[in-house]
Image (spheres, helix red, strand yellow):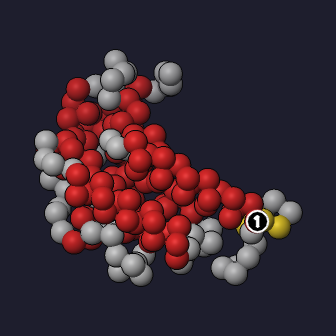
Amino acid sequence: MLTREVAKANHYFMSFSAPPRDSDIYMIRFLRTLLDFQDSTQFSDEAESRIVGFLKNWPENKLVSRAIWPPKNTENHDLMQLVLGLFARQFRGEDIKSHIAELKKFIVHRMEGGFIEFNSKCYQYHFSNPLMILADYAPDDELKIGAQMLLNLLLTERVVLGVNGYLGGPSL
């Protein structure tokens, strides 16, 4: 377990404000922290409550609740929004079955249709972060396995596009 600067980390999570742009990029990281540490004595109740509060108030719209092919915005934002929507509903105590079905559809779209922007070096971790959350914490076993399979596919594709240890391929 991490033990460095725990008080500083708790203070940050107790006091952060929503970023003006790309809030999903930040919230997906905060969600990961919440899920990783929610049962830890290191994570303060106040820090946990702050993140849960942001999640419970996450907006509900088509981007958050529907898998769209081809992507409506960008793949990474579509996936982050879907994952945040899933856990927002879960923390609000709402039914998540339809949301799980949409995430499964999103994964199938990627398995069948491929990736539009994953080969971009700047988007790889933005797409991988929510996928790793699903691989570790999805509340449905099939969704969890699907996320793990898609992550394996992404990493395999990354290796294939590698040139002497660097990302090569069509995006560069």
User: Percent x, y for residue 109?
Assistant: 45, 71
Q: Quadrant of the C terminus?
A: bottom right
**Secondary element at image label 1:** helix
Front residue of 154/113: it is: 113
Answer few, some or many: residues within 10 Å of disc 1's Cα (few below 14, many 20 plus, some between 14 and 19): few
User: Percent x, y for residue 129?
Assistant: 48, 53
Q: Is residue 57 left or right of residue 160?
A: left
User: Percent x, y for residue 170?
Assistant: 70, 81
**Residue drawn 52% across the image and 72% down it:** 112
User: Percent x, y for residue 11?
Assistant: 31, 33
**Residue drawn 27% across the image and 47% down it:** 87
- Residue marked by disc 1: 160
Q: Is residue 58 above or below residue 172?
A: above
**Can residue 18 be seen in the rendering of this structure?**
no
Q: Is residue 171 left or right of residue 86?
A: right
**Residue drawn 48% across the image and 47% down it:** 145
Displayed quadrant of residue 73: bottom left
Displayed quadrant of residue 103: bottom left
**Residue drawn 52% across the image and 76% down it:** 113
